[in-house]
Amino acid sequence: MKKNITRDHQEYLLETLKSQKEAAAYIDAALEEGDNEVFLVALRNVVEAYGMTKIARKVKLNRENMYRILSEKGNHEFSSPWELFTSLDLRLSVAVS
């Protein structure tokens, strides 16, 4: 039987991202890329790891709105990502390069 490597990788990634330390490092690495799409994929993976419904409730959105916010074509209001970070007990930091 042939394994689905992509699915296995995604499952492993989501399990790893349940650690706040790993989630923070993952999002930080995505931020360093400077690409909004990369950042949104990383944020979506972290939210999925924590549970889309659980996080949606914390930020007072329904799950469908969460998916929309985190999609490539979603509504990327400035406040939405910051509400997600707060609900995950994460914060962003800026360092001088």
Image: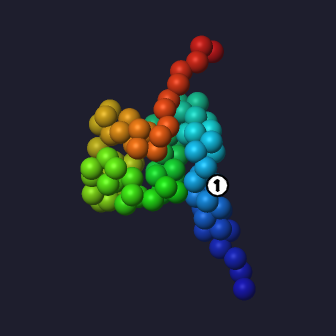
Who is closer to the viewer here, 62 or 74?
62
Q: Is residue 43 left or right of residue 5?
A: left
Quarter placement of the N terminus: bottom right
Q: Percent x, y for residue 20?
A: 58, 45
The residue sitting at 38% across, 35% down in the picture is: 82
Q: Is residue 12 above or below residue 43?
A: below
Q: How many marks?
A: 1
The residue sitting at 49% across, 32% down in the picture is: 91
Q: Secondary structure at mark 1?
A: helix
What residue would you read off at disc 1?
16
Residue 74 can be seen in this image: no
Crowdedness near tag 1: few (<14), some (14–19) or many (≥20) residues, C-alpha within 10 Å: some
Q: Tell me the kind of residue under disc 1.
A: Thr
Q: Percent x, y for residue 51?
A: 45, 59
The residue sitting at 65% across, 61% down in the picture is: 12
Residue 53 can be seen in this image: yes
Q: Is residue 81 above or below residue 47?
A: above
Who is closer to the viewer here, 4 or 45?
45
